[in-house]
Each structure stands twice: as structure tokens, then as C-alpha cells.
Amino acid sequence: MSKRLNTKYTDFLKEETLYLHFSLSQLIAHMPKGPVSTLLLFLTQNDIYPDSAPINFISLSDTINMLKYPPMNKRVDNGRHDDHYEIPTQTSARIGRIVKSIVSKVDKSKFSCEYKGSATFDGGKNITFNVSKNGKSFAKFYDENPDIITLDSPSNNLRTFVQVTKGTKVIGSTIYDYDDETGRIYWDDDRDYFTITLTDPIDINGVEDVTIKFDAVFSGKRIEDINDSHIEKFVNDITAFIKMNMSTENSVIEEVKGEDIRKWYNTDNYQSKTGQLGGSCMSYEFCQGYLDIYTENPHQISLLILKSDNNKLIGRALLWKLDNGKRFVDRVYCHTDYDLKIFDKWAIDNKCIYRSPGNNNNITYYENGVKIEPEALEVTLHNCDFDQYPYVDTLCYLDQESCTLSNEPIQFDMELRDTDGKWSEWYNDNDNYDPDY
């Protein structure tokens, strides 16, 4: 049965969040920090970006200076965000245009808040708003603005301005960028007090009220201050970063076996620690000992690698020789979506089965560029008895008696889905479920 396409965007997306594809968000996270990059990351972490915005679920495109996103009337109401990045009908636009649209659609009032009320002073320097004394007004103010008041994301800071007045005269103020290490602004555990420490003490005689304003700032800039020059710099930075990480047109995929698999899993040989390749859980030095099942079965397991011009890894995927004579290209780990297409083309040219990227819980299989029905993929190994095992994406079910790995849990002893070299054992002597880590 075909899925009904949702034409009402607000029916699908209930949260106000900016969604960026993993590869794109990782590129931005590893770029030089600036107002635009820190703002975009902030919007992916907070419910601020409006659900009615036409641009969302943004990913890399085939063109370096463009990004793509699904049209609103093509987004499927199935609750799975990842599906939207793979919708065939995508709209492409220049990076600068997309950023300008995002900035213009955001409710800028959500990036600052202001409170005025009575307070108590300690030595003329520590200001405490007492919930009991201020009634419910301050508690309500805090509850309505928690993302701004408690802002501590590493991608941005909180700029706080405190103004103490006597009549119409300002007699003391402070402004600074806040982070957790300053400890000058805090909300205590029982939520009865909110304390601010001024830069300098003041004479509190006759003080009538205190005004405090919180502004979210991104690399020192409020969202109102982000202009065309900031956007242009971001476009130049991300374009250069994409070029640095994407493969060249004449890139060739190599097949390696044995100890070379261990070499190219090691993060020391990566072009950069970005994208799904940089985030791979098996890339660390301490994981090298987990890979024996790959290196000790060269007739059944090899590794496809894609390297940059300076001989650094920018993409890899396991290649399995299946018992039915076919070959299967496993999950691809690479820096950018551009490189994914190179692996897909290799699989098609070499008549291999291959799978969808990411998300091991909802795998789609392809052959010759066409989606196929899920089938049992099995590999009988020469050696499967090891002290440690890697996290295996697809063929993760091991039957020790037959030394067979499969993608289907029909009959198996161990599930190889642990990132610490361990496994799950599923059968005891009575063939009952008995997990053991």
C-alpha cells in the first residue's frame, strides 16, 4: 500500500525545530565558529524554528554551493524524520538563500527576555529575586524563558544586562557573556531564589527596582546583528569545507583485506573527523582489537575505501561475500553525501547488493539501483571465535556452531551490536532468552 503524502505541514511536525542532516550538521560543527554556524546549531537543539517554515530537513546536494530540502507537500506523515532526506523530489537552493530564509522566519523575540521587579541585596553586589516576595511573576517569567535564562550551549553564550535604578537614575549596571564557569548567575535547586552578582557593588539606599535582560548571542552577535556579511562568510566557509572533504571526480574505490582493514578503520588515517565517518564508534584506537573477525576472514570480508588526494580516508564500507555467491556492500561511512553516491555507483557497477545509509533499524536494500524486498543475507566465516567483536551494522547475528553471520535473527547465539567489544548472548541451554553482557 502506498503511503499517503501529507500536505499539511503542521499536522506532521509538532515541535518547532530546525532539522539538518547528520552530514551537514557535522560539517557545520567542525567549521570555524561564527554567528551563522552557531545560530544554526542552536536552532537544531531548541524548539524555536517555526514549524510553518517552508525550508526544513536540509541536507547536502550534488552541487557544492547548494543545499536541498523536501517540499512541504511531499513530507510524509510517518513520524520518522530521517525519511524526509531521502524523498526523491527535493528542492535545491543556494546556501545563502536558505540561511537568509531561516533567519527571517525565526521569532526573534524568543532570543531575549526582560524582567523588572523588587530584589534583595547582599553587600550591594549580589542581587536576589525572591519568588515569595515577587509573587508568581518571577516564577512565571522563569518558566516561560528557560532556554534563554539557562542557556549554556557550547555553540553560543548568554549576554546579561542588569540595570539598577533609583527613581529615573541608573546607579549600577553590568553586562557580560555568561557561561557555567563564571557562576555569577544561578538558580538554586529548590527554585526559591535567582541570584545575580554585579561587577561592582552599589549603594542600595533608595533603590526602587532592578531590571535584568537576557540576550542569546552567537559568537558575540545577537540574532538581530547577523547581516549579509556574516552570511556571506558562512557560505564561503562551508563551501570551502565541503570542497576540502568531498572526493575528487577521479576518485577510485579500492578493496583491501586483512590487516589493511584495521589500518583504515583507525581515525588517525581519516581526512577529518566529520560526517558519519568521523562519528563511527569503531574508529578509535582502543577498538583496533575488536576487528579480528574482519582481518581473520579475508575470503569472506574485505573493506572498500575511498581516499583523498593526500592519501587520507574519506569513506569506507565493508564488503561481504555472501553464501549465495552475491556480494553485499554494507553501511557506508563517509564525510559527505557526495561520497555516498560514489559507493552506490561502485555497488551498481559491480552488481552488488547495497543498503540505505544510516539508521540500522529501518534498512532498505537495493540492487542495480532498484529497491528490493528484504532477504536473508548470510556469510559463513572461516573463523568466528574471538575474545572481542566489533559493532556490526547489518550482519550482526552470529551462530557460533555454523560460524555464520546473518542480518536476520532466525537462529543465532550472539548479537554483535555492542560498542565495547562485547556482545549479547540470546540462548541458554534450554533455548530460552538469556542476555549476557
Image (cartoon, rainbow, N blue to C red):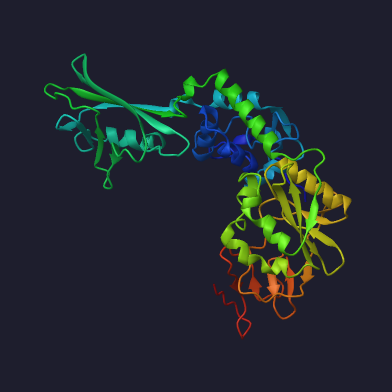
Residue positioned most to the top:
168
Q: Residue at x 50, y 35 (%)?
A: 42
User: Hey, which residue is sitting farthest bottom in the picture?
Assistant: 429
Q: Residue at x 55, y 40 (%)?
A: 14
Task: Looking at the picture, tell me which residue is in the foreground, 260 or 337.
Answer: 260
From this viewpoint, is residue 180 visible? Answer: yes
Does residue 417 appear left or right of residue 221 in this picture?
right
Residue found 80% across the figure and 59% down from its top = 328
Q: Residue furthest front?
A: 310
Horizontal and vertical percent for residue 378?
Answer: 78, 69
Count the marks.
0
Q: Is residue 78 visible?
A: no
Residue in the foreground of this view, choosing between 13 and 331: 331
Horizontal side of 197 relative to 311 (left or right) equals left
272, above or below 117, in the image: below
Picture residue at 59% right of the left edge, 71% below the top: 424
Q: Nearer the viewer, residue 100 or 80?
A: 100
From what the image shows, is residue 336 above or below residue 123?
below
Q: Residue 431, position in %: x, y?
A: 63, 82
Q: Position of residue 20 (x, y in %)?
A: 61, 38
Image quadrant in which the C terminus is located: bottom right
Q: Nearer the viewer, residue 222 or 432?
A: 222
Measuring from the top left, give residue 179's x and y in whole percent: 37, 37
Q: In the rendered image of this protein, does residue 322 appear above or below residue 36?
A: below
Q: Splitting the image into 4 quarters, where does residue 13 fall?
A: top right
